[in-house]
Amino acid sequence: MKFLLAGCVLVALASSIAVPKSDFISYDGYKVFRVKTLGRLESIRDKLSSLSYEEWSGPERTHFDIAIPPEELAAFERLDLDSHCMHQDLGASIKKESAKQTVWKRQVDDMSWFDSYHPYEDHQQYFDDLHAAFPDNSEMVSSGTSYEGRDMFGIHMWGADGPGKPAVLWHGTVHAREWITSMNLEYFSHQLATGYSTDNITRSFLDNYDFYVFPFVNPDGFVYTQTTNRLWRKNRQPPPPPPANQSCIGRDVNRQWPFQWDANPDGASPDPCAQTYRGETPSDSPENQGMVSFVNHLRDTQGIKLYIDFHSYGQYILSAWGYNCTIYDESLGRHTKLAAVTSDAIYEGGNGTVFVFGPVCATLYATTGGSNDYVLGPGKADWSYAFELRDKGDYGFVLPPEQIRGSAEETWAGMQAMLSLLDEEFFDGEGPAVGA
């Protein structure tokens, strides 16, 4: 059981993201605003109804975030809304995000990987190299094939006595524009592999649980964000007939899980043109089908100890339920306590970053057909969460490359605290959870 550092430097490559300029949708001159709502969401939307804009985030309790094209800026400013500008020029922010040059030496121990964002093919190679460096304790796995035929690859890692322990399942990039999620998952995987031979705590994680890490649930959408539209969210599956809808591509893979799929009209949209389009039936995208099948397989074989679906942005640790704001699962108390411990560990991890925690619906907004609801319910996981990573709204989806390491390091501090307490009996007055 060993971690083998890549002994030879392969071809050094610059990990900037090549974008075909003729096809790439320009956001030059767009501004992104956080608009305060304070209970007046509908009246504010009425004011905005005459404008063309792109909604970045669903309405939270106090605000929502929107991108305004340059031709609408004067009209937006005349509305005199209580707002904060997140991006003065979104196009310039996107160029800065993608242009940073870093020479990655194709060595798994080269931490400069976490100084830049990367093309999809380089992410695939990173996981191949990680597996090659930890060969006795890992294997490459797949949850299936995307609509456009890409492998939804992942890595399976284990410790002493071989595979077969209760599973920890992490995945990201369900929503294509949330680039920071894959970088965090790569950092976690790197820490597990490198720490196994050097750190007793990390060794205990791998000895107690099997880890399954899927960085790209929505690979087609992710590639599309790098070639065509940086802010694309959904997969790339065509809509159902009639022909009038054929320009509205994609399903929201995280509104597709076959549990409480149609339980709340505020939780997803039946409109193929909407960002939260749920599909025609539950799990009618290949990406969602693949993850549902994988979750069910783990449930029926090893059991799922911990599940986390990583997203951005907002800095939240969210438990079930998402489909209803007034129904609470009997496990909510311990889920809230573990989330509180994790939030404290993130805060104390060096950056002072604050993560809010609570059930999805009551804390953020309603979501139907959501992943952590399914995995806690039909998936029978002991623990099930969705994380929203950095930031709180200064940059949103276009998080600068210089924040990648800080995000990964602080979240890993939270993961270590969470993994250390998965088998604790909360509220019994005994054990580490008492003082947590």
Image: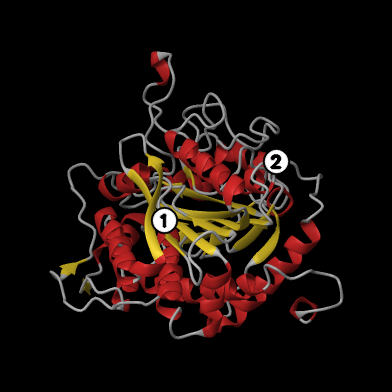
Mark 2 near mark 1, Cβ–Cβ under 8 Å?
no
Q: Identify the residue at the far top of this view.
A: 242
Q: Is residue 360 visible?
A: yes
Residue 376 at x, y = what percent? 68, 49
Local packing at callout 2 (Cα closer than 10 Å; few below 14, some 14-19, many 20+) is many
Q: Nearer the viewer, mark 2 or mark 1?
A: 1
Q: In the rendered view, would you say 274 is above or below 423?
A: above
- Where, quadrant-wise, is the C terminus in this rendering? bottom right
Can you tell which quarter of the image residue 17 is in?
A: bottom left
What amino acid does circle 2 point to? Tyr
Local packing at callout 1 (Cα closer than 10 Å; few below 14, some 14-19, many 20+) is many
- Circle 2 is placed at which residue position? 323
Mark 2 or mark 1: name the one nearer the start of the chain: 1
| Left or right: 174 in relation to 47 | left
- Circle 1 is placed at which residue position? 215
Element under label 1? Answer: loop
- Tell me which residue sits at (51%, 39%) in the image: 293
- Tell me which residue sits at (44%, 52%) in the image: 173
Element under label 2? Answer: loop
Q: In the rendered view, would you say 287 is above or below 372?
A: above
- Tell me which residue sits at (42%, 24%) in the image: 239
Residue 316 at x, y = what percent? 62, 61
Judge by depth and name the residue closer to the eye, 374 or 302: 302
What amino acid does circle 1 point to? Pro
Q: Identify the residue at the far right of this view.
A: 429
Q: Is residue 252 visible?
A: no
Residue 244 at x, y = what percent? 41, 16
Can you tell which quarter of the image residue 1 is in?
A: bottom left
Q: CA distance from mark 2 to mark 1?
A: 25 Å
| Left or right: 128 in relation to 18 | right
Q: In the rendered view, would you say 197 is above or below 371?
A: below
